[in-house]
Protein backbone atom coordinates (compact mmCIF):
# COMPACT_ATOMS: atom_id res chain seq x y z
CA UNK A 1 0.00 0.00 0.00
CA UNK A 2 1.14 3.55 -0.67
CA UNK A 3 2.70 5.42 2.26
CA UNK A 4 3.23 2.19 4.11
CA UNK A 5 4.44 4.04 7.20
CA UNK A 6 1.23 6.03 7.49
CA UNK A 7 -2.12 4.43 8.20
CA UNK A 8 -5.53 5.87 9.04
CA UNK A 9 -7.88 3.86 11.28
CA UNK A 10 -11.47 4.91 10.55
CA UNK A 11 -13.91 3.95 13.30
CA UNK A 12 -17.43 3.66 11.89
CA UNK A 13 -18.56 1.95 8.68
CA UNK A 14 -21.60 4.13 8.04
CA UNK A 15 -21.97 6.68 5.25
CA UNK A 16 -19.24 9.04 6.49
CA UNK A 17 -16.77 6.27 7.29
CA UNK A 18 -17.23 4.68 3.87
CA UNK A 19 -16.90 8.08 2.20
CA UNK A 20 -13.59 8.46 4.06
CA UNK A 21 -12.54 5.07 2.67
CA UNK A 22 -13.10 6.38 -0.86
CA UNK A 23 -11.36 9.71 -0.34
CA UNK A 24 -8.38 8.13 1.43
CA UNK A 25 -8.08 5.54 -1.32
CA UNK A 26 -8.04 8.26 -3.99
CA UNK A 27 -5.34 10.05 -1.99
CA UNK A 28 -3.20 6.89 -1.89
CA UNK A 29 -3.37 6.71 1.91
CA UNK A 30 -3.50 3.34 3.69
CA UNK A 31 -6.57 2.80 5.86
CA UNK A 32 -8.74 0.32 7.69
CA UNK A 33 -12.44 0.83 8.58
CA UNK A 34 -13.75 -0.73 11.81
CA UNK A 35 -17.53 -1.20 11.96
CA UNK A 36 -19.15 -2.53 15.14
CA UNK A 37 -22.20 -4.04 13.40
CA UNK A 38 -22.07 -7.56 11.89
CA UNK A 39 -22.90 -6.35 8.37
CA UNK A 40 -22.48 -3.27 6.23
CA UNK A 41 -25.70 -1.55 5.22
CA UNK A 42 -28.31 -3.58 7.07
CA UNK A 43 -31.79 -2.49 6.01
CA UNK A 44 -32.94 -0.84 9.21
CA UNK A 45 -32.53 2.91 8.75
CA UNK A 46 -34.44 5.77 7.18
CA UNK A 47 -33.62 8.00 4.21
CA UNK A 48 -30.70 10.29 3.37
CA UNK A 49 -30.70 13.31 1.08
CA UNK A 50 -27.50 14.18 -0.78
CA UNK A 51 -27.24 17.68 -2.22
CA UNK A 52 -25.27 18.67 -5.34
CA UNK A 53 -22.07 19.58 -3.48
CA UNK A 54 -22.06 16.14 -1.85
CA UNK A 55 -22.78 14.37 -5.13
CA UNK A 56 -19.95 16.37 -6.69
CA UNK A 57 -17.38 14.94 -4.26
CA UNK A 58 -18.81 11.45 -4.69
CA UNK A 59 -18.53 11.90 -8.46
CA UNK A 60 -14.81 12.57 -7.99
CA UNK A 61 -14.40 9.09 -6.50
CA UNK A 62 -16.36 7.49 -9.35
CA UNK A 63 -19.73 6.88 -7.70
CA UNK A 64 -22.10 9.22 -9.54
CA UNK A 65 -23.64 6.71 -11.96
CA UNK A 66 -24.14 4.03 -9.31
CA UNK A 67 -25.71 6.56 -6.93
CA UNK A 68 -28.09 7.83 -9.57
CA UNK A 69 -29.17 4.23 -10.14
CA UNK A 70 -30.35 3.81 -6.52
CA UNK A 71 -31.52 7.36 -5.69
CA UNK A 72 -34.39 9.58 -6.76
CA UNK A 73 -34.05 13.26 -7.72
CA UNK A 74 -35.82 15.49 -5.20
CA UNK A 75 -37.86 17.77 -7.42
CA UNK A 76 -40.47 19.63 -5.37
CA UNK A 77 -41.69 20.63 -1.90
CA UNK A 78 -45.33 20.80 -0.85
CA UNK A 79 -46.87 22.18 2.31
CA UNK A 80 -50.14 20.97 3.87
CA UNK A 81 -52.38 22.42 6.56
CA UNK A 82 -53.27 20.48 9.73
CA UNK A 83 -56.59 19.48 8.11
CA UNK A 84 -54.80 17.96 5.07
CA UNK A 85 -55.41 20.71 2.52
CA UNK A 86 -52.54 21.65 0.22
CA UNK A 87 -51.36 25.04 1.41
CA UNK A 88 -48.75 25.87 -1.17
CA UNK A 89 -46.04 24.57 -3.49
CA UNK A 90 -42.72 25.75 -2.13
CA UNK A 91 -39.65 26.66 -4.12
CA UNK A 92 -36.75 24.60 -2.82
CA UNK A 93 -35.61 21.29 -4.24
CA UNK A 94 -36.80 22.36 -7.69
CA UNK A 95 -34.15 25.09 -7.89
CA UNK A 96 -31.03 22.98 -7.23
CA UNK A 97 -30.80 21.97 -10.88
CA UNK A 98 -30.88 25.59 -12.03
CA UNK A 99 -28.56 26.95 -9.36
CA UNK A 100 -26.01 24.13 -9.00
CA UNK A 101 -26.45 21.91 -12.07
CA UNK A 102 -28.06 18.89 -10.38
CA UNK A 103 -30.99 17.98 -8.15
CA UNK A 104 -30.52 16.76 -4.61
CA UNK A 105 -31.19 12.99 -4.45
CA UNK A 106 -33.17 10.92 -1.95
CA UNK A 107 -31.72 7.55 -0.91
CA UNK A 108 -32.74 4.64 1.23
CA UNK A 109 -29.93 4.71 3.81
CA UNK A 110 -29.14 1.02 3.39
CA UNK A 111 -28.97 1.31 -0.41
CA UNK A 112 -26.65 4.30 -0.12
CA UNK A 113 -24.30 2.50 2.27
CA UNK A 114 -24.18 -0.61 0.10
CA UNK A 115 -23.44 1.50 -2.96
CA UNK A 116 -20.61 3.25 -1.13
CA UNK A 117 -19.21 -0.11 -0.04
CA UNK A 118 -19.63 -1.90 -3.35
CA UNK A 119 -18.02 1.04 -5.17
CA UNK A 120 -14.72 0.37 -3.40
CA UNK A 121 -12.15 -1.80 -5.16
CA UNK A 122 -11.91 -5.39 -3.91
CA UNK A 123 -8.65 -4.67 -2.04
CA UNK A 124 -10.27 -1.64 -0.40
CA UNK A 125 -13.39 -3.64 0.48
CA UNK A 126 -11.12 -6.05 2.35
CA UNK A 127 -10.07 -3.13 4.56
CA UNK A 128 -13.67 -2.61 5.74
CA UNK A 129 -14.06 -4.92 8.75
CA UNK A 130 -17.26 -5.77 10.63
CA UNK A 131 -17.93 -6.96 14.20
CA UNK A 132 -15.23 -4.55 15.38
CA UNK A 133 -16.60 -2.90 18.51
CA UNK A 134 -13.87 -0.60 19.82
CA UNK A 135 -13.00 -1.16 23.49
CA UNK A 136 -9.81 0.90 23.88
CA UNK A 137 -7.77 3.56 22.11
CA UNK A 138 -4.25 4.52 23.17
CA UNK A 139 -1.97 7.09 21.59
CA UNK A 140 1.59 8.32 21.95
CA UNK A 141 4.17 10.13 19.85
CA UNK A 142 4.70 7.05 17.69
CA UNK A 143 1.06 6.48 16.73
CA UNK A 144 -2.22 4.96 17.87
CA UNK A 145 -3.50 1.53 18.85
CA UNK A 146 -7.15 0.53 18.69
CA UNK A 147 -8.37 -2.61 20.43
CA UNK A 148 -11.68 -4.35 19.72
CA UNK A 149 -14.01 -6.59 21.69
CA UNK A 150 -13.03 -9.64 19.62
CA UNK A 151 -9.43 -9.37 20.87
CA UNK A 152 -7.95 -7.83 17.72
CA UNK A 153 -5.74 -4.74 17.70
CA UNK A 154 -4.95 -2.26 14.96
CA UNK A 155 -1.92 0.02 14.90
CA UNK A 156 -1.80 3.17 12.84
CA UNK A 157 -0.89 6.81 12.63
CA UNK A 158 -4.24 8.50 13.29
CA UNK A 159 -7.78 7.52 14.24
CA UNK A 160 -10.74 9.16 12.49
CA UNK A 161 -13.93 8.98 14.52
CA UNK A 162 -16.75 8.65 11.99
CA UNK A 163 -18.86 6.76 14.52
CA UNK A 164 -21.81 9.07 14.92
CA UNK A 165 -23.60 11.03 17.60
CA UNK A 166 -22.54 8.77 20.49
CA UNK A 167 -18.95 8.47 19.28
CA UNK A 168 -16.61 6.09 21.08
CA UNK A 169 -13.62 7.90 19.57
CA UNK A 170 -14.84 11.20 20.98
CA UNK A 171 -15.10 9.66 24.43
CA UNK A 172 -11.53 8.34 24.29
CA UNK A 173 -10.31 11.64 22.85
CA UNK A 174 -11.71 13.44 25.86
CA UNK A 175 -10.24 10.87 28.27
CA UNK A 176 -6.79 11.18 26.72
CA UNK A 177 -6.99 14.97 26.88
CA UNK A 178 -7.87 14.93 30.58
CA UNK A 179 -5.02 12.50 31.27
CA UNK A 180 -2.45 14.58 29.39
CA UNK A 181 -3.29 18.30 29.62
CA UNK A 182 0.13 19.20 28.18
CA UNK A 183 -1.24 18.55 24.67
CA UNK A 184 -4.44 20.58 25.09
CA UNK A 185 -6.12 22.38 27.92
CA UNK A 186 -8.89 20.30 29.45
CA UNK A 187 -11.14 23.36 29.30
CA UNK A 188 -10.91 23.21 25.50
CA UNK A 189 -12.85 19.97 25.50
CA UNK A 190 -16.59 19.55 25.52
CA UNK A 191 -18.81 17.85 28.06
CA UNK A 192 -18.93 14.06 28.06
CA UNK A 193 -22.39 14.35 26.47
CA UNK A 194 -21.80 17.47 24.37
CA UNK A 195 -25.03 17.69 22.39
CA UNK A 196 -28.41 18.91 23.65
CA UNK A 197 -31.76 17.50 22.48
CA UNK A 198 -34.84 19.71 22.44
CA UNK A 199 -36.90 17.65 19.98
CA UNK A 200 -37.50 14.00 19.24
CA UNK A 201 -38.55 12.22 16.09
CA UNK A 202 -40.19 9.01 14.98
CA UNK A 203 -39.55 7.73 11.45
CA UNK A 204 -40.83 4.82 9.43
CA UNK A 205 -40.36 3.46 5.92
CA UNK A 206 -43.17 1.90 3.91
CA UNK A 207 -44.17 1.09 0.30
CA UNK A 208 -44.76 4.11 -1.89
CA UNK A 209 -48.45 4.88 -2.14
CA UNK A 210 -49.21 4.75 -5.86
CA UNK A 211 -48.04 6.38 -9.09
CA UNK A 212 -48.69 9.84 -10.42
CA UNK A 213 -49.47 13.05 -8.58
CA UNK A 214 -52.12 11.83 -6.13
CA UNK A 215 -49.64 11.71 -3.26
CA UNK A 216 -47.17 14.24 -4.61
CA UNK A 217 -45.22 12.09 -7.04
CA UNK A 218 -41.74 10.58 -6.84
CA UNK A 219 -39.15 13.04 -5.56
CA UNK A 220 -41.62 15.14 -3.56
CA UNK A 221 -41.03 16.29 0.02
CA UNK A 222 -44.26 17.17 1.84
CA UNK A 223 -44.56 18.94 5.19
CA UNK A 224 -47.40 19.48 7.63
CA UNK A 225 -46.73 21.97 10.43
CA UNK A 226 -48.35 22.35 13.83
CA UNK A 227 -48.06 23.67 17.36
CA UNK A 228 -45.06 21.89 18.88
CA UNK A 229 -45.00 19.17 16.22
CA UNK A 230 -44.59 18.61 12.49
CA UNK A 231 -44.38 15.79 9.95
CA UNK A 232 -42.33 15.25 6.79
CA UNK A 233 -43.25 12.84 4.00
CA UNK A 234 -40.51 11.92 1.48
CA UNK A 235 -41.72 10.05 -1.61
CA UNK A 236 -39.42 7.63 -3.39
CA UNK A 237 -40.02 5.33 -6.33
CA UNK A 238 -40.63 2.11 -4.40
CA UNK A 239 -40.19 3.20 -0.80
CA UNK A 240 -41.24 6.32 1.09
CA UNK A 241 -40.61 7.69 4.57
CA UNK A 242 -42.25 9.83 7.20
CA UNK A 243 -40.61 11.77 10.03
CA UNK A 244 -42.81 12.93 12.91
CA UNK A 245 -41.26 15.63 15.12
CA UNK A 246 -42.25 16.72 18.61
CA UNK A 247 -40.78 19.23 21.05
CA UNK A 248 -39.52 17.65 24.27
CA UNK A 249 -40.90 18.92 27.59
CA UNK A 250 -37.34 19.80 28.71
CA UNK A 251 -33.95 19.87 26.97
CA UNK A 252 -31.72 16.90 27.75
CA UNK A 253 -28.20 15.65 27.13
CA UNK A 254 -29.11 12.10 28.11
CA UNK A 255 -29.16 9.30 25.58
CA UNK A 256 -32.58 7.66 25.41
CA UNK A 257 -33.09 4.21 23.89
CA UNK A 258 -36.68 4.02 22.66
CA UNK A 259 -38.34 0.61 22.34
CA UNK A 260 -40.70 -0.52 19.59
CA UNK A 261 -43.50 -0.14 22.13
CA UNK A 262 -42.48 3.51 22.50
CA UNK A 263 -42.51 3.87 18.71
CA UNK A 264 -46.01 2.36 18.47
CA UNK A 265 -47.35 4.61 21.23
CA UNK A 266 -45.87 7.69 19.57
CA UNK A 267 -47.36 6.70 16.20
CA UNK A 268 -50.74 6.29 17.86
CA UNK A 269 -50.44 9.71 19.47
CA UNK A 270 -49.97 11.35 16.07
CA UNK A 271 -52.00 8.84 14.06
CA UNK A 272 -54.33 11.46 12.59
CA UNK A 273 -51.68 13.88 11.41
CA UNK A 274 -52.14 14.41 7.66
CA UNK A 275 -49.36 13.65 5.20
CA UNK A 276 -51.37 15.05 2.28
CA UNK A 277 -55.03 15.40 1.33
CA UNK A 278 -55.70 11.68 1.76
CA UNK A 279 -53.06 9.92 3.85
CA UNK A 280 -52.61 10.03 7.60
CA UNK A 281 -49.77 8.78 9.78
CA UNK A 282 -51.84 5.73 10.78
CA UNK A 283 -52.27 4.69 7.13
CA UNK A 284 -48.56 4.35 6.38
CA UNK A 285 -47.40 3.23 9.84
CA UNK A 286 -49.60 0.16 9.44
CA UNK A 287 -47.60 -0.71 6.27
CA UNK A 288 -44.15 -0.02 7.73
CA UNK A 289 -41.01 -1.91 6.78
CA UNK A 290 -39.00 -0.42 9.63
CA UNK A 291 -39.57 2.23 12.26
CA UNK A 292 -37.51 3.93 14.93
CA UNK A 293 -37.39 6.84 17.29
CA UNK A 294 -34.66 9.10 18.65
CA UNK A 295 -33.98 12.33 20.45
CA UNK A 296 -32.56 14.93 18.06
CA UNK A 297 -29.17 16.06 19.33
CA UNK A 298 -27.86 19.48 18.30
CA UNK A 299 -24.50 21.18 18.61
CA UNK A 300 -20.97 21.72 17.30
CA UNK A 301 -17.94 20.66 19.33
CA UNK A 302 -15.36 23.22 20.37
CA UNK A 303 -12.51 20.82 19.58
CA UNK A 304 -12.52 18.11 16.89
CA UNK A 305 -9.07 16.58 17.44
CA UNK A 306 -6.43 15.78 20.03
CA UNK A 307 -2.66 15.39 20.00
CA UNK A 308 -2.28 14.97 16.25
CA UNK A 309 -3.60 11.42 16.63
CA UNK A 310 -7.40 11.48 17.02
CA UNK A 311 -9.81 13.50 14.88
CA UNK A 312 -13.59 13.51 14.42
CA UNK A 313 -15.83 13.77 11.36
CA UNK A 314 -19.56 13.87 10.68
CA UNK A 315 -22.06 13.50 13.53
CA UNK A 316 -19.25 12.77 15.98
CA UNK A 317 -18.15 16.43 15.64
CA UNK A 318 -21.41 18.23 14.86
CA UNK A 319 -25.06 17.26 14.99
CA UNK A 320 -28.06 18.90 13.34
CA UNK A 321 -31.77 18.25 13.39
CA UNK A 322 -32.62 16.46 10.12
CA UNK A 323 -35.44 18.60 8.71
CA UNK A 324 -33.35 20.01 5.86
CA UNK A 325 -31.07 16.98 5.38
CA UNK A 326 -27.69 18.56 6.16
CA UNK A 327 -26.12 15.82 8.31
CA UNK A 328 -24.54 13.51 5.75
CA UNK A 329 -23.86 16.39 3.38
CA UNK A 330 -21.63 17.92 6.04
CA UNK A 331 -20.07 14.52 6.66
CA UNK A 332 -19.07 14.34 2.99
CA UNK A 333 -17.57 17.83 3.24
CA UNK A 334 -15.64 16.72 6.34
CA UNK A 335 -14.26 13.67 4.55
CA UNK A 336 -13.02 15.78 1.64
CA UNK A 337 -11.55 18.55 3.80
CA UNK A 338 -9.82 16.12 6.18
CA UNK A 339 -8.42 14.00 3.35
CA UNK A 340 -7.12 17.14 1.63
CA UNK A 341 -5.22 18.10 4.79
CA UNK A 342 -3.79 14.59 5.27
CA UNK A 343 -2.75 14.54 1.62
CA UNK A 344 -0.97 17.90 2.02
CA UNK A 345 0.76 16.77 5.22
CA UNK A 346 2.03 13.60 3.55
CA UNK A 347 3.28 15.42 0.45
CA UNK A 348 5.04 17.97 2.65
CA UNK A 349 6.59 15.17 4.69
CA UNK A 350 7.75 13.39 1.54
CA UNK A 351 9.54 16.57 0.50
CA UNK A 352 11.14 17.13 3.89
CA UNK A 353 8.56 19.53 5.23
CA UNK A 354 7.48 17.82 8.44
CA UNK A 355 8.19 14.12 8.55
CA UNK A 356 10.35 12.10 10.84
CA UNK A 357 10.67 14.44 13.81
CA UNK A 358 8.20 14.39 16.63
CA UNK A 359 7.74 10.64 16.49
CA UNK A 360 7.38 8.29 13.55
CA UNK A 361 3.88 6.90 13.08
CA UNK A 362 3.10 3.25 13.63
CA UNK A 363 2.28 1.27 10.53
CA UNK A 364 3.56 -1.49 8.31
CA UNK A 365 6.46 -0.89 6.00
CA UNK A 366 8.75 2.04 5.33
CA UNK A 367 7.69 5.43 4.02
CA UNK A 368 7.34 9.08 4.92
CA UNK A 369 5.24 10.05 7.88
CA UNK A 370 4.28 13.53 9.08
CA UNK A 371 5.27 14.57 12.58
CA UNK A 372 2.78 14.91 15.39
CA UNK A 373 3.13 18.67 15.08
CA UNK A 374 2.36 18.55 11.35
CA UNK A 375 -0.70 16.37 11.93
CA UNK A 376 -1.94 18.62 14.73
CA UNK A 377 -1.63 21.60 12.41
CA UNK A 378 -3.44 19.72 9.65
CA UNK A 379 -6.33 18.88 12.00
CA UNK A 380 -6.56 22.50 13.15
CA UNK A 381 -6.74 23.66 9.51
CA UNK A 382 -9.42 21.06 8.83
CA UNK A 383 -11.58 22.26 11.71
CA UNK A 384 -11.03 25.91 10.81
CA UNK A 385 -12.06 25.25 7.21
CA UNK A 386 -15.24 23.50 8.26
CA UNK A 387 -16.36 25.48 11.32
CA UNK A 388 -18.16 28.37 9.63
CA UNK A 389 -20.11 26.02 7.37
CA UNK A 390 -21.23 23.65 10.11
CA UNK A 391 -22.23 26.46 12.48
CA UNK A 392 -24.25 28.06 9.69
CA UNK A 393 -25.94 24.74 8.88
CA UNK A 394 -26.64 24.13 12.57
CA UNK A 395 -28.50 27.45 12.69
CA UNK A 396 -30.38 26.76 9.47
CA UNK A 397 -31.46 23.30 10.63
CA UNK A 398 -32.53 24.60 14.03
CA UNK A 399 -34.55 27.40 12.44
CA UNK A 400 -36.47 25.00 10.20
CA UNK A 401 -37.18 22.56 13.02
CA UNK A 402 -38.55 25.31 15.22
CA UNK A 403 -40.45 27.05 12.44
CA UNK A 404 -42.07 23.82 11.27
CA UNK A 405 -43.15 23.00 14.82
CA UNK A 406 -44.13 26.61 15.69
CA UNK A 407 -41.73 26.98 18.59
CA UNK A 408 -42.95 30.51 19.29
CA UNK A 409 -45.50 33.03 18.09
CA UNK A 410 -42.78 34.57 15.93
CA UNK A 411 -42.05 31.23 14.24
CA UNK A 412 -45.77 30.70 13.65
CA UNK A 413 -46.19 34.21 12.24
CA UNK A 414 -43.28 33.75 9.84
CA UNK A 415 -44.49 30.34 8.74
CA UNK A 416 -48.19 31.09 8.38
CA UNK A 417 -48.32 34.75 7.40
CA UNK A 418 -44.98 36.06 6.11
CA UNK A 419 -43.68 33.24 3.89
CA UNK A 420 -46.93 32.83 1.91
CA UNK A 421 -46.85 36.53 1.02
CA UNK A 422 -43.28 36.56 -0.31
CA UNK A 423 -43.42 37.18 -4.08
CA UNK A 424 -41.85 34.51 -6.29
CA UNK A 425 -39.00 36.72 -7.49
CA UNK A 426 -37.98 37.47 -3.91
CA UNK A 427 -38.34 33.82 -2.86
CA UNK A 428 -36.01 32.80 -5.71
CA UNK A 429 -33.48 35.47 -4.73
CA UNK A 430 -33.55 34.28 -1.12
CA UNK A 431 -33.13 30.65 -2.17
CA UNK A 432 -30.22 31.59 -4.40
CA UNK A 433 -28.48 33.41 -1.55
CA UNK A 434 -29.29 31.00 1.28
CA UNK A 435 -29.20 27.66 -0.58
CA UNK A 436 -27.60 27.92 -4.02
CA UNK A 437 -24.62 30.01 -2.95
CA UNK A 438 -24.17 27.93 0.21
CA UNK A 439 -23.97 24.76 -1.90
CA UNK A 440 -21.61 26.45 -4.39
CA UNK A 441 -19.06 26.93 -1.60
CA UNK A 442 -18.75 23.15 -1.20
CA UNK A 443 -15.32 21.56 -0.98
CA UNK A 444 -13.73 19.18 -3.48
CA UNK A 445 -10.87 16.71 -3.34
CA UNK A 446 -8.34 19.31 -4.39
CA UNK A 447 -5.62 16.81 -5.35
CA UNK A 448 -7.80 15.23 -8.08
CA UNK A 449 -8.38 16.63 -11.54
CA UNK A 450 -11.22 15.89 -13.91
CA UNK A 451 -14.28 17.30 -15.61
CA UNK A 452 -16.84 19.37 -13.73
CA UNK A 453 -19.92 17.10 -13.38
CA UNK A 454 -22.48 19.84 -12.70
CA UNK A 455 -22.77 23.32 -14.16
CA UNK A 456 -25.51 25.68 -13.00
CA UNK A 457 -26.12 29.40 -12.93
CA UNK A 458 -23.95 29.82 -9.81
CA UNK A 459 -20.25 29.10 -10.38
CA UNK A 460 -18.48 26.76 -7.97
CA UNK A 461 -16.17 28.56 -5.55
CA UNK A 462 -13.73 25.64 -5.79
CA UNK A 463 -13.72 24.45 -9.41
CA UNK A 464 -12.39 21.03 -10.30
CA UNK A 465 -9.16 21.50 -12.24
CA UNK A 466 -8.06 19.52 -15.27
CA UNK A 467 -4.90 18.34 -13.56
CA UNK A 468 -4.08 18.24 -9.86
CA UNK A 469 -1.47 16.70 -7.58
CA UNK A 470 -2.92 13.18 -7.65
CA UNK A 471 -2.42 10.55 -4.94
CA UNK A 472 0.61 10.74 -2.67
CA UNK A 473 1.91 7.56 -4.31
CA UNK A 474 0.45 5.01 -6.69
CA UNK A 475 -1.01 1.87 -5.14
Image: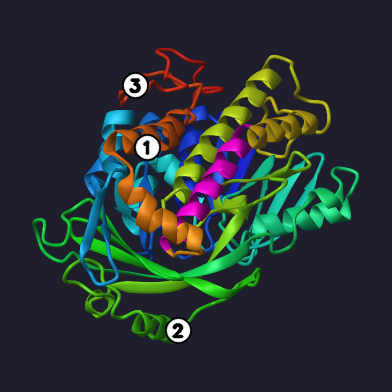
The span picked out in magenta is: 385-404
Residue 195 position within the rendered picture, expressed as x and y whole percent measured from the top left = 64, 60
- Does dot 2 land on a helix, a strand or a loop? helix
Q: Magenta: predominant secondary structure element?
A: helix
Q: Residue at x 37, y 41 (%)?
A: 51
In the image shown, does 189 or 10 lie closer to the viewer? 189
Tell me the number on the disc at residue 452: 3
* Residue receiving disc 1: 431
Residue 462 position within the rendered picture, expressed as x and y whole percent measured from the top left = 47, 21
Q: Residues within 10 Å of mark 2 (few under 14, many from 20)?
A: some
Tell me the number on the disc at residue 262: 2
| Image quadrant where one finds the N terminus | top right
- Does dot 1 land on a helix, a strand or a loop? helix
Residue 7 position within the rendered picture, expressed as x and y whole percent measured from the top left = 63, 38
* Marked residue nearer the N-terminal end (1 or 3): 1
Magenta stretch encompasses residue 411? no
Q: Residue at x 75, y 60 (%)?
A: 191
- Left or right: 417, with 214 as reference point: right
Amino acid sequence: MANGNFRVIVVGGGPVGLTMAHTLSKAGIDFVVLERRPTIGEDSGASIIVSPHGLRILSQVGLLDSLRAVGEPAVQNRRYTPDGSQYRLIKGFSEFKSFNGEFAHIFNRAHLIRTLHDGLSKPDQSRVLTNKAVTDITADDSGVTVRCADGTRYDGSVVVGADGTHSVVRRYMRTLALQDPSKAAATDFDEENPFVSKYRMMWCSFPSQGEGDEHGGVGTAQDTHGDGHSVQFLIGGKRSWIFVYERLPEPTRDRVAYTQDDVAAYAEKWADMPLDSGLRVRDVFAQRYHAGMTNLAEGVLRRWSWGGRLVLAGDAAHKFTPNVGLGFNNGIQDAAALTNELHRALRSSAHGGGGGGGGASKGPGPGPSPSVEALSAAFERYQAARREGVESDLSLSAFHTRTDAWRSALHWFWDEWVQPQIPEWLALWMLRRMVGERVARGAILDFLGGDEPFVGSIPWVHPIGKSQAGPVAAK
